[in-house]
Amino acid sequence: MRVLALVVAHLALAALLPLVSARSRRGAFALAAVPPAAALLWALAHAPVALAGGVSSTVVWAPQLDLVLSFRLDALALAMVVLVSGIGALILVYCIGYFADSPEAPRNAALLLAFAGVMLGLVLADDLLTLYVFWELTSVASFLLVGQSGETRENRGAAVQALLVTVFGGLVMLLGFIMLGEAAGTYRISEIVELGRAGALGGGVVTAALMLVLVGALTKSAQLPFHPWLPAAMAAPTPVSAYLHAASMVKAGVYLVARLSPGVADRTAWWVTVIVLGLATMAVGGWRAMGATDLKRLLAFGTVSQLGFLMVLFGAGTRIAAVAGVAMLLAHGFFKAPLFLAVGIVDHATGTRDVRRLSGVGDALRGTALISAAAAASMAGLPPLLGFVGKEAALEAFLAEHSTRGALVEAGVVAGSVLTVAYSARFLWGAFARKPGVPDTPVHPPGPLLTVPAGICAVAGLVLGLVPGIVDADAQSYARAYPAGPEQYELALWHGIGPPLLLSALALVVGYGLHRARGTVGRLAGRFPAALSAQRAYEVAIGGTERLATGVTARLQAGSVPAYLTVILVVVILLPGLATLIGGTWPAQPLFHAVLQFPFAAVVLLAALALIRVRRRLTAVLLVGLIGYGVGGLFIVDGAPDLALTQFLVETLSLVAFVFVLRRLPAHFGAERPKPRTWVPRAVVAVVAGGVVSAMAVVLSGARRAPPTVSAEYVRLAPEDAGATNVVNAIIVDFRALDTVGEITVLFVAAVGVASLVLAAPPDRRRRRQRDVELPRKDAQQDEEVVTR
Amino acid sequence: MITPTINLLMALTVGGLYAVGFYLLLQRSLMRVLIGVVVLGHGTNLLLQLVGGPPARAPIVGSAPADTFADPLPQALALTAVVITFALTTFLLALSYRSFVLLGHDEVQDDLEDRRIARRGGPAAPLHQDAGPDGRTEDER
C-alpha cells in the first residue's frame, strides 16, 4: 500500500509541477527532488527488513480477473531504489542549475519526476503484469524526454528509435510473461523464482517464455544487437542521459535478468544467451567508445559495455557472480552518473563536447576534473573505489568456477576490462587534458548546484569502496538465493595478492597502453564496417517495414468500391460457400411445391435478367417494380396475404419515389458500356455468389430438426391473449410490438434523412449555378480527374 | 410440422435475384447500385419467407385447422424486413439524388488519396526520412 502511495505521490506532484514552474523553474526542480528523496529514506528505513528476506505489499485491483498490484522490497530492489531515487534526487538538484535558462524546463521537470515514479514502481514490482505496466511507462517517459519538443530531427529520430526498439522488446516480453505466468500458475515474481529454485518449473514452454522475456531485457538494456538506440538517445539533455540512460532505466533489463536468474540460471538456454550476448556487448561497446569523439557518445558506448558486463554477472547464476553483480550495479550508477553530469558541466562551461576541440579544461574546472577522475578511476577499477571492489569480485567469480566456461568468460571479462580502462583514460584525456596544437577552450565557471550533486555521487563511490561492508550486506542477502559454492566470498578491498588482483593490474597496464596508442586505435574503431552496423540494420528494417506497408496498402486499399465489394463477395464464396458445400448435407427436395410458383418465378427471373442490360433508367425502375410484384405473388402462393399486401403497397410507393427522382436525372445511365475485361469477372463473381446463396438456402433450411414450437404458441395464444384471428397481425402489433416500434423508428429516421437531403438541395443548386459561371473549366477538369473508370 | 425445405425452383429464383443484385452492386452508376440493393432486398425477403416452410394455408384462426397453417413467425419477420428495405431504398435514393445535384453525375468515385498511394506502389524515397534516425557516423560530426 505504501509503495503504491509513494509512486502515486511522484505522479501527482509531477502533474502539479507545471503550476510551480510557471512561478519558478528552480523551485519546480527543487520540489521535484523531494519525492525521490523521500522514497530513498523510506527504503533505507526498511533496509533491515528488506535484507532479512523482503517485505511485500499487495493492492487488489480487479480480483475477478486476478489482477493485483503487488510490490516487494528486498535486497536487489533496495540497490535499485538507491540508484533510482538516490541518484534521481541528486540529478534533479543538478537540473536546478542546468535548466535554469531553458524554455524546456517545465516539461522536463514534470517528466523527470514522473519517470522517477514509474521507475520506482518498476523496481519494486513483484507481479509480472505490474512490472510490465511500469516497464512500458518508462519507455514512454524516455521517448518524451529524448524527443524534447521535437524541434530537431536528431531528437525526433532518436526518440522514435528508442521507443520502437524498447516497446518492441516490451511487447515480446509481455508474451513471455503471460506464457511464464500461465505455466507457473502465478504471476508473482517471488513465487515464480521460488518454483524455479525448487525445480518445479519445467518444460519447453517455460524455456520459450524465458527467451521472449530476454528479448525485452536485452532491448531495454541496449544489448547486442539492439544497442544503437542508446548512443542515439544521447540527443537528450545531459541530466536526462545521466538519469535514464546511465543510472536507472537502461538497468531495467539487467534488473529483470537479476530478478529471474535465481530461479532459472541453471537453464542452458538462459545463461548461454545472456553470457554470450553480454560479453559481445561488453567488447563492442568498449571498442566503439574508443572511436567516439563526442564525450556523451563515448560514455554511452561505455554504458553499453558495462551493461553487457552486468548481464554476464547476473546471468552466470553463481553466488560470487551475484555478489559482484550487485556491487557493480551500484558502482556503475555511482561512477557513470557523475561522469555524465561532468560532461554536462563541461558542455555548459565551454559550449562543446568534442574531444578534438576541448583543451586545457582541467585547469579551469579543477573541481569537476577531480570528481571525474574519481569516477573514471572507479570505472577503470582502481582501488580504493567501489568499482575496484566489484571488479575483484567479478574476476574471482569466474576463476572460482574452475571450469572451461569460467575460463572463457574470465578471458572475455578481462578483455572488456582492458577496453574499460582504455576508454576511461580516453574520457579524462578528452575532457580535461591540454592537447598540443589545440588552443585552450574558453570556460565560464559553473555554479555549485552543478558540481555538488556530481561530487556527492563520486564520493559515495569512494565511501562504499572504503567501507565495502555496506554493499556486501546487500549483495550477500541477494546472493543467498543462488546455490552455495564451495567457498565463501566477501566484498573487501584487500583479498591478498592472487590471480584477480594480477588480472586487474594486467587490465590496467594494457588498457593504459591502448590509450597511449589512441591515434591508431581511434582511427580503427572509427572505421566500423557499415555492413555490420546494427544502426544500419535498424534503418533497413524500419525503411523496409514502411515500404511493405505502402505496398500492401496500395494493393489492398485500391480506393475503388467495386473492387472492395468483389473482395467481400469472393470471401463469401470461399469461406461460408465452401463450408456449406463441404460440410452441409443436401436434403431431398421437390422441384416445386405449387404450380403457381412457376409463372411468378418466371416473371421475377426474366425481369431480373433484363435489368442487367437495360440502359434507360425508367425501364430499370419499372423492371424492379415488376420483380417486387412477382415476389408479392409468390408470397400469396406461400399463404402470406399480409406480407403480400405490404409488398404491393411498398412496391407502389417505391415506384412513386423513384419516378419523382428520375424526373431530374438523365434518361440513360451515364457510363458507356464497360469493357468485357471489366464486366466478365464481375458477372462471374456475382453469379457464383448468387449460386452460393441459393445452395446455402437449401442446405441450411434442410438443417432444421425441431418443429417451430414458438410459432405454434403464437397460433394458440393469438385468439386468447391478443383477441386476434390473424396470427401475423397479432405478432406484429402485440407479441413483438417492440420490434414494430423499432421498425417505425427506422422509417421516421429515414424520412427525416430523405427530407433533409431533398429539401437542402435548392440553395446548393443556386450556389452551383454561380460556381459554374465563375469556374466552368476547372470544375470540369476536376470531375474528369476524380472519376476513374 | 414436416421439416421444411426450399424447393429447387424457389432456390433458383432466390439465387437469380442475388446474382443480379450482386452484379448491379458492382457497377459504377449509383442508381444501378441502388437498384441492386432493392433487388437484393427482394431476394432476402423472399428467402426469409421461404425458410418458414412450403406453401400452406394463411395463418388466420378459424379459417382452417391450425396444423395446416403456414409458419406465421417468418412472415412477421419478412414483413418487418419489407418495410425496412423500403426505408433504406428511399434514403439511398435521396442520397444519389443529392450526389447528382452536387456533382452533376451519379457515379461512385474512387478515393483520391487511395489512388495516389496505389500509384506510388513502392515509394522511391521511404516515408520515414523525416523521422528517421541520425545516420551520421562520428567522423561526420
Image (cartoon, coloured by chain):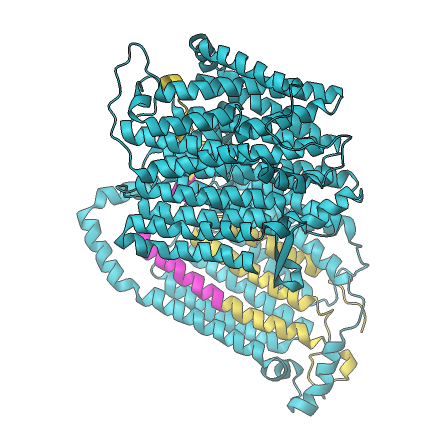
Chain colours: A cyan, B yellow
Q: Is residue A191 left or right of residue A675?
A: right
Residue at x 48%, y 15% (from the top left corner): A528
Residue B18 occupies quadrant: bottom right
**Depth check, front residue: A670 or A411:** A411
The chief SS type of the magenta part is helix
Quarter occupied by the N terminus of chain A = bottom right
Residue that protrudes farthest toward the left in the picture: A774
Quick one: quadrant of the C terminus of chain A? top left
Asked if residue A468 lies left or right of residue A712, the reply is left
Residue A608, above or below A236: below
Q: Which x, y percent locates residue A626?
A: 54, 63
Residue nearer the viewer, A50 or A269: A50
Residue at x 40%, y 41% (from the top left corner): A91
- Marks counted in the figure total 0
- Tell which of A34 and A745 is nearer to you: A34
Residue located 41% across and 42% down the image: A90
Q: Position of residue A31 (x, y in %)?
A: 37, 52
Highlighted range, magenta: B87-114
Q: Is residue A653 visible?
A: yes
Q: What x and y, as percent, mark residue A291?
A: 44, 17
Horizontally, residue A652 falls left or right of residue A412, namely left
Q: Position of residue A419 (x, y in %)?
A: 53, 18
Whether residue A96 is situated above or below residue B17 in the rendered picture:
above
Can residue A786 be seen by looking at this rendering?
no
